[in-house]
């Protein structure tokens, strides 16, 4: 497992809700539910060049990029870049399997991490969260099929 430093100054709940509201996967979820979701997130600070997840290792968390940029690498080759308000790990958090890519910070980056166990409990309580994730996965499948 790679060392990722927890950010020492945590954001206020209202700040987290506003950030979460700006993420497409969560945009339609009511603020009161996002406030509860914000309470179970882990906030991470990743330095430039630091690996967040590694291809082939088991993944069981969903990540939201708050600020910064990550390179996506498969078999050592860069295939994409993710930036603020983008999400990754949505498949791993639903169905744990080895990560399909390595994610490396290309600048100092702030992330929210939502672990699988917490998300499953939350989806059981709030169907809106499950619907949001399903919606994003469907959009990704449509993009891949065109």
Image (cartoon, helix red, strand yellow):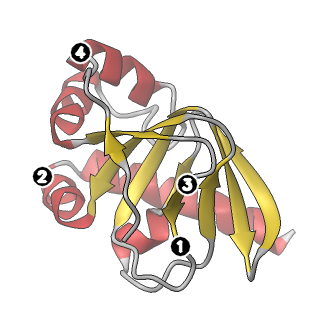
Q: Residue furthest right?
A: 146
- Return the disc, 1 or 3, that comes first in the chain's sequence: 1
Within 10 Å of disc 2 (Cα), the crowding (few <14, some 14-19, many 20+) is few
Task: Residue 12: give its label.
Answer: 4
- Identity of the residue drawn at 29% across and 27% down: 30
- Badge 2 vs badge 4, beta-carbon distance below 8 Å: no
Report if the CB atoms under discs 2 and 1 are less than 8 Å apart. no
- The numbered mark at residue 65 is none
Q: Pointer 2: what residue?
A: 125
**11 shown above or below 103:** above
* Residues at discs 3 and 4 in contact (Cβ within 8 Å): no
For disc 4, the neighbor class at 10 Å (few under 14, some 14 to 19, many from 20) is: few
Quarter-of-image position of residue 68? top right
1 or 4: mark nearer the eye: 1
Q: CA distance from mark 1 to mark 3?
A: 23 Å
Q: Position of residue 46 (x, y in %)?
A: 48, 42
Give how far apart the Cα atoms at labels 3 and 4 are. 27 Å
Task: Find residue 111 and report its image quarter.
Answer: top left
- Which type of secondary structure does the marked residue at label 3 adopt? helix
Q: Nearer the viewer, mark 2 or mark 1?
A: 1
């Amino acid at each position: 497992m790679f060392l990722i430093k927890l950010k020492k100054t945590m954001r206020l709940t209202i700040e987290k809700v506003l950030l979460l509201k700006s993420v497409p996967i969560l945009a339609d979820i009511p603020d009161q539910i996002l406030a509860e979701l914000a309470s179970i997130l882990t906030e991470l600070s990743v330095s430039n060049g630091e690996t967040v997840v590694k291809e082939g290792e088991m993944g069981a968390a969903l990540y939201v990029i708050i600020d910064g940029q990550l390179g996506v690498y498969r078999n050592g080759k860069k295939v994409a870049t993710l930036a603020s308000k983008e999400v990754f790990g949505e498949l791993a958090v639903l169905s744990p399997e080895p990560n399909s890519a390595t994610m490396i910070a290309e600048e100092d980056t702030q992330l929210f991490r939502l672990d699988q166990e917490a998300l499953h409990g939350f989806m059981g309580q709030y169907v809106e969260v499950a619907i949001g994730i399903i919606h994003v996965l469907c959009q990704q499948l449509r993009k891949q099929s065109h």
